[in-house]
Amino acid sequence: MLHAVAAADSVRVDLRGVDGTLRDNVLAHLGDVRIDPRRRLSDRGRERILATSRQRVRDALKPYGYYTPEIDAELRQEGEDFVIALRVRRGTPVRIAQSNVSLTGDGAAHPELVAWRRSMPLKEGLRLDQPAWTVYKDAGLDTARRFGYLAANYVEQRIAVDLDGVSADLDLELDTGPRYVMGRTVFEDNPLRPGVLESIPRFETGEFYNARLVNRFRLDLSGTGYFDSVTVTESRNDAADPPSVDLLVATETGARNRTQGAIGVGTDTGIRLQANYTRVPMSSRGDRLDVGAGWREIDDELTLRGTYRVPQNNRRRNYWIADGTLTFENRDLEVKRRDEDEDFIPVANGNIDDRHLRLGQLMVRNRSAGDQQRLTTLFGQFLSSTNDYQPFSVVDGVGPLSGDIDGLLRSTDASASVGIEVNVVDVQGRGFANRGKRDTFWLFRSVYSRSENAGFTQAYASSRRVYNVGERGKWLIRGEIGYTESKVDRVSIDLGADVLDLSVTRLPSFYRFRAGGSTSVRGYGPEQLSNNNVGSNHVLTASVEYEHRFLPAWSLAGFVDIGNAFNDWSDPELKTGVGLGLRWYSVVGPVRIDVAQARDFTGQPWRVHLSVGTPLL
């Protein structure tokens, strides 16, 4: 038996014979018992306190099926304190003889409600548990209303207790009533022309009501950036046939110009700076402009970018888009003597400039009854890139480079390609509860290249999934595969004592695959896994991670990553990284610190990775 003492001002309760939930409920029913120690307690007063305490214990035990307990109670004084000593023998519990749950109404055959009916926890032979009965009933109403049976109610809910037989019969009948549909969606005055906001709901008028999609509608409206505040009011129309729910949308619009700046640090980037400007909406058409600039310490990389999006006239959830990126970076050209070496040998330093423009049409479509969205972009893209490396005068202790390396050191290219990109997004929850998936696929082919024999075709697919396991655990699984049909050159570099044979793709650097780093194969440096750090035609990576929360905002993780970027499918030479991580779910997003070991490098070195943000985005 457990022995518990709970303080209640000048009266303590010494309770034995019950534990766990029963003990908590008994103490809650006893509440505060107050006795003025300055006044003499009469025998009648003492008996009244004990009788009240016994009755409260009985009342606390009945919901859990104990109707005939034996309770010994004693009130004694210890110094200036009074103590109520209670010894409880629970007796024979009431067990369930019959348990009948039925469904009537239009939703009697609805799969979710049928599953609820079958999940009744109070089976025949089990102890009566009225709190579980209440939770089960609440779940039934919640399920019914969530799927549009808004008038659902219990026409019978009966517990018949037979104290002589120490048994109980349960009868429960849920009448779902009719199923409601989505009615009109009315937008109050706003600065956007008709048709812009009407394209946002993930449901159509006349579809069955779904509370989850109404909540997503609120989030989608806020996510447009058009408004400072959004209020969606539901109004039931019971007289309609079928009954419906109308939505009234009220919005407030403030400043259209938003400016943001950030400074941070990461193991893949070093110090980084970022500035963004957004104007939304730019006009009554609902168009949006985002421009930004970013700099990172590693490779002294400067990026300028701009995105413009405008809804198409009379084409629901279709948009014209334009994306432009200018990237300027200074990086070392590095090679390895052996693939298993961790360290590279710098052989040259130079500038890489990329100018990229994508024009296309974005189509947003619903999947899985609106729970997921598929974003399809048909595009044409244009790339102008320049690589200009200057070889070092001394390389690895010997003279300058020699060999047929002009194409490796300097190149200028311009290309145009057409393709398609598809993203399927289903992200729910925040913080540790974040879950869902993000699938990405693209395919494009060059239709023009200024360089001879530099045409290419590229296909890529990736998937990221997060599965919650109870309240404290979650699995993170991701994988990617990329393939490029592009010519590969063999380049020899003379390092004096060694001649290195390199595999160099003709694919423009902007489109080359690289692996390694905090969001790829951990244990290896950022973009360290490719053909001599210059990028490759193909990529293949995968990761499995388990995360366990030990405090509300903190969790630990263990993971295994594998992958590489390469030019030859017959010899991908996949690398493995293993490690442990610490997660902090801060107000700015998850902060992820990983310590990982590169299993395929000489000496199996350890590396620390730091990143911020959810792995699903």
Image (tube, rainbow, N blue to C red):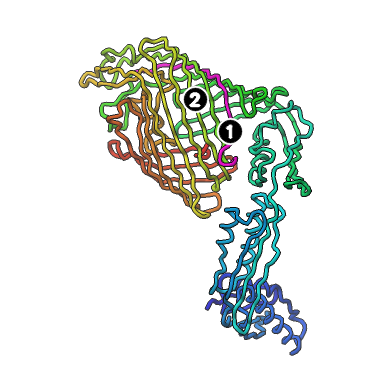
Residue 8 screen position, x and y as percent: 68, 73
Can residue 350 be found in the magenta stretch?
A: yes
Residue at point 74% right, 45% down? 234
Q: Is residue 389 above or below residue 318?
A: above
Find the magenta span and give its range.
348-370
- Specify the label residue 293 is tagged with: none
Depth order, front residue of 617/109: 109
Residue 255 screen position, x and y as percent: 73, 28
Depth order, front residue of 283/233: 233
Q: Earlier in the sequence, mark 1 or mark 2?
A: 1
Label 1 with label 2: CB-CB less than 8 Å: no
Q: Amino acid at mark 2?
A: Ile
Q: Is residue 126 above or below residue 177?
A: below
Residue 289 screen position, x and y as percent: 64, 23
Q: CA distance from mark 1 to mark 2?
A: 15 Å
Can the viewer see residue 480?
yes
Residue 202 screen position, x and y as percent: 63, 37
Q: Residues within 10 Å of mark 1 (few under 14, many from 20)?
A: some
Secondary structure beneath dot 1 equals: strand
Can the viewer see residue 85?
no
The residue identified by callout 1 is: 365
Taking the view exactly as shown, the residue that stands out farthest to the left is 497
Relative side of 33 to 607, left or right = right
The residue identified by callout 2 is: 420
The image quadrant of residue 197 is: top right
Magenta segment main secondary structure: strand
